Structures are given as structure tokens and as C-alpha cells.
Amino acid sequence: MKGKRMKGFSLFMTIAVLCGIMLTVPAAAIGAGKPIVIGGSLPLTGEFAETGLWIERGMRYWAEEINTKGGLLGRPVEFKIYDDQSNVGKAVTFAEKAITVDKVDLLFGGYPGTAARAVMAVAEKHKMVYISMGGHMKSFQQGYAYSFGAPPLMGEWWYEGFFQWLNSLPANQRPKRAAVYTINNPVGLSLQDCIYRWTKYLNIKIVIDEKYNSPLTDATSMIVKAKQMNCDILFSNGFFPDGVTTMKAAKALGYNPKAIVQGIGSVVPAWVKELGADGNYVFSGTVLHGMLNYPGNDKLNAYVKKKYKLGIYPLYFGFGYAWMQTLQQGVTGANSLDQTKIRDWLKTHKVNTIAGPMTFDKYGLPGPINFATQIINGKVELIWPKNVQTKQPVYPKPAWTK
Amino acid sequence: MDAVLLTQSLISGIMMGMVYALLSVGFSLTWGVMHVIHISHAAFGLLGAYVAYSLLEYFGVDPIVSAAVSVPLLFLLACGVYQLLIKPITKAKEVIVASMILTFGLAIILENVMVLIWKADPRIMTPTYSSGALIVGPLYFQYPHLVGFGLSIVGITAIYLFLQKTYTGMAVRAAWQQPEAAQLYGVNLYRISMITFALAVSTAGAGGISLALLNSFEPHSHNLWLIYLFLVVIVGGVGNVVGTALAGLIIGVITGLSMALLPFQWVNLVTFGLLMVFLIFRPHGLFKQGV
């Protein structure tokens, strides 16, 4: 009996261990020659796994593409990807490990901004080029010479496009009273800069300005307050879970402001997939979009359509791909894996990415990029600037349908 | 102070608190009766939520109805887990420590299984009433909150009546109070433990479904839920069903009041500060321990 139980237990544990191994198997080397190893970590499990997986898919698509074309500097590329489990501390540990133990040739960018900005310091210490989204403006102002945002994710720029569009409306059509709810972390707080500048300029009064800590388990009180104070624009500066909680409460409590502006949560594919029609009409911003008229976007859209049955590539798929595009141009431009040569080439040359052409300033940042988006009929549409507009914005937001 | 805001916040807080109580009652029971700190309890709750999600998505089965399917399924699964994993460690010298380590591993395995089956994408349970509300004067009773609250009342009452009114329930209580004496009276401790464990996991399933009606969830959400489990059980007293329900209510009232009266960024600080205070002054919880 005991033997049988032990046998069963052993079988169970073996399966469990195999499952674990399956999750961490790196990409197989493709092609001949000693591969160029690109290492680092992504949040493949945990809070940011949804996004991390899309970044990985974008990177792997780039690798697949470049290996088919003969590799980088004539050598195949392969990834050494660790799962940091959405933990900043682990992201730092794995970056150190990739550089000092695995001795990878190149680093890839991580997620989210809190992890990326922590890894930026590690990359700087080891003089390794690190191309990522960074961790908003402050992370790029630390004097790092080896970090680049290509494209970066800048909370400070996130709503620029939205406000520029709002500015284009006649003054009497604009909202008058704003409720601003911000997740209390560096990502959320970086979004406030833009709101404060523009609401002052557009004469929109901020009547509620509150921060909340994650997790936000209930947004009822927030919505009641916004409704009672007649706020006709709601800024929900957070991620997916708190964004969803806020939207559900807004609908349940019949809160119908002229506009709902949401931070990062509304750009992940799950927003439209899971919220359905309730996710519509939310404004946000982006630095990257599959409908932008830059080379490569059509190809990526075709790929995700075939592989994932999506009409357009998800934002973070694009980020993963664009960071690798930049790294690729740095390496081929420098014709070397010497990190300082790659850095110097990137500092002095223009790179072309799916987010557009970029040159980098002393902080490793391109010029401000910002496009306003709105979810219309379940799709993230570009609504501003006009030259990239894919749909006319829907404003004021229609009342909730029961 | 705005009376509507205060009342509305209290209503939401209390309903939310009761959902946490439902999720926690089984956790409290296994801890109290078996001395097993079941770290994967919330992961089983999440599994129940995913099953309900799939039944809703693919077959249009309402989560309340699917609870009738997933709860018994979890009961059977838990019987198997007990026989395979939990029973052997109840013989360990340090059952509490051994159970924590074992069930921590089980939670990781369950999380990875959920990632494999349902992917890492966040999910939202959206039955037709998911964003509706019953409006009474100036107050809104959100349907998902009402459903969660209702399930909690039914679930906790059922557990309470089971323990108080049935022979097996009385045996569970006897096993908790006097294990040796209970054995002398013919109570099979292993059988009682298996039923307790399976019952606990079943309530986790119901709690998971209730919680999934209120918030989005992902395979790692159980880690967050686990924090609330500890909070409720420590406040309510280990193994105390009524205490767990009251702890849920108290936590709900405190959260509701905090959300109405304090800046939002203080809410978690106040709620979890409470845990520290209870641990310092009443390390065994607010209420007397026991089943």
C-alpha cells in the first residue's frame, strides 16, 4: 500500500517537474555557427505575465525572421529567457546572472517599467547596452550611457495625444470637472504630470485627485464620489485589474462621464476580449500601433492574424519586436558585439523601427512620441494626430447599455 | 460626512468581506481540525473560478449553477489530494510546517496547471448581471456583490449546520476537541480529516466563484487571495466558523469605512494594519478557537 502510494507520489512529482521544465525551455538554436545569445528575464508568470508573454512572442518572431535571413553578423541568434515571475528583485538577479554567469552576448529589454528601470542600473554597471521601455522619464535621467528607449514607455507622454485632441474641441464641449484616480506606483504617478499640465491649460478643474494602492478590490466608493461631485471626465490611471474593477463599478452605478481615460490596462488584448462592449470608448495613449504607416507593421499584423487570429498585433508584441529591431541595427551598424561600439553607433545614427525612425538624445530617448487611442467596437483605434487617425473619436461617451 | 457615500461604501465592504469569509471558512477548518495550513486553499478556489468561467464562456452556464457542478467536483478532487498528499504528512512531527511547505508546492503546481489550461491572460466573469445593480433609493446593490453575499451566507450556514447538526459534523468537532477520546468512541480520524479537507476545498471553490464575480483573476491571483485568508482567519480565530463570518463582516466594515472616510491610499494600510494589531494583542484571534 505504502509502495503504491510512493509510486503514485513519484509519478505525480515527475509530471510536475516536467511541466516546470517545459515552461523554462529556451529557444532551440537555429542555423549553423556559434549562436549569439541574447539574455535577460521577462514576467512569464505572475501579475504581468499576459504582457510578458506578448513581448516574448514579439522577440521570438524577430529571431525567427533574422535567423531565416542568415542571422546577426552571420550567426544565428538565440534567447536565454528567465521567468522573473513579475518580481523586480528577480529581474535584477536574472540580469546579473545572464551577464556574469551565462555571459550572454546581448541583453533584451524587460517589463514592466519598475523592472526595466532596475535592470538599467545593472546594465550600466556591466556596460551592456539595454534597449527597453525603461521606467518612465526619471529612469532615463539617471545618467546611464548604455540604456535606450526604443520606443520607450513614457507615462509623462501617455495622454499627450488625448489632450491634444481635446484641445482641438470647442471649449464648451470639453469636460469641466475631472476625477483622477491613480495607482500608487511609479507607473501611475508618471501619468499625473501630463494631466496636471493639460487640465490647467484647458481650464478643467481637478475635483478629485486620489491615489490608491494595489490591489483595488472595490471601486464603488471611488465611483460614488466621482458621480456625486459631477465629474464629467474620469482618469483611471492604473493597470488591467484595477481598470476592470473601476469600469465595472462605473457601469453598475450608472456613472456616465463625457470621457473615461484609462492608463495601461486598456491596451492589453484582454481588455476588449474580456470586457466586451463595456470596454468600449475608453481613451488612452500609445507610442506604437499596428496601423501606423511605418515599414514592418503590415508584416507583423499579417503574422499575428495567421498565428493568433488577431486583426492587429498587440502593443507589447510590437514592443518586443521593436526593441530587437533597434538592437539589431546597433549591432550591424557597429559590426561588432562590443557594447561600447554598439552604444556609440546608436547614439550617433538613426534607427528605423515599426514605431518610426528614431535618433537618441543624451538620455537614450527619442523625441516625444504620442498617439491618442480609443477603443471603438472592440478595437484600439488611433484617433489623434489626424494624419494617423484610423477612426473618428466617439465623444461624449455613450451611456452604458444594460 | 455624506451619508449616501458612507452607506454605499459600507454595503460594498460588508458584501466583499462576506465573500472573503466564505473563501476563508474552509481554510480555518483545515487549520483548526487537522493542523494543516493549507496554502493551496486559495489556488483551489481559483480553480473553481476557472471551471465556472469556462462553463459560462463555452456553455453559457451561470456561475451560480456551475457552483453546483464545480463544488462537488472539487470535493472529489480534494479527497484524492488528501489520500495522496495530505494524509502522509499528518504523521509528520511538525504537521503545520510540513503542511505549509507541501501545500505551497501544490499551489505552485496548480498555478502552472492553470497557466497551461487557461493561459496567463486575465479573465473576467461576465454573466448577464455582472455590471447590473438593484437600485433602492440612492443606494446601489451591485448584483455580483449580492450573488457573492448570498453564496457566502448559504455556504457558511451550511458548514455551520453540518458541524452542529450532523453526526459527521459532531465527529469533526470531537476530533478537534479531544482526538484521542473521539477515537475511543469509534471516530475514524482519517475519514473525518478527509471529509473536513474536502469540505474545506469545496467552500474554497464557492468562494473563488464569488470573488471572480467581483474582480478579474489570473492564475497567480490565489497569492493575493491567500493574504485575505490569513487576515480573516487570524481575526476570526482558527477553526471558528462563526468567528470567520464575523471577521469577514468586521473586515468589510473597516474597509468600507476606510474607503468612505480616508484617502484611498490608506485603505490597505488600515486593513492590514489591523492584522498586525490582532497578532500583537490577540495572537489566537478575536474569537475563541474551536470548531
Image (cartoon, coloured by chain):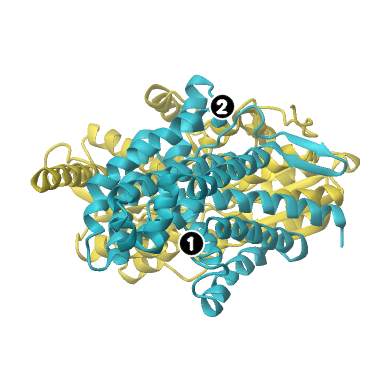
Cα distance in 3D space between marks 2 and 1? 29 Å
Viewer-proximal residue among A103 and A240: A240
* Residue A265, numbered circle: none
Q: Colour of chain A?
A: yellow
Give the residue type that dot 2 points to. Asp
- Chain on which label 1 sits: B
Q: Secondary structure at mark 1?
A: helix
Q: Colour of chain B?
A: cyan
Farthest residue toward the left?
Answer: A3
Q: Secondary structure at mark 2?
A: loop
Number of other residues with Cα within 10 Å of mark 2, as a class: few under 14, some 14 to 19, many 20 or more? some
Instruction: Provide the residue designation for mark 2.
Output: B62
Q: Quadrant of residue A381?
A: top right
Farthest residue toward the front?
Answer: B185
Farthest residue toward the right?
Answer: A172
- Chain on which label 2 sits: B
Q: In the picture, which quadrant includes the N terminus of chain B?
A: bottom right
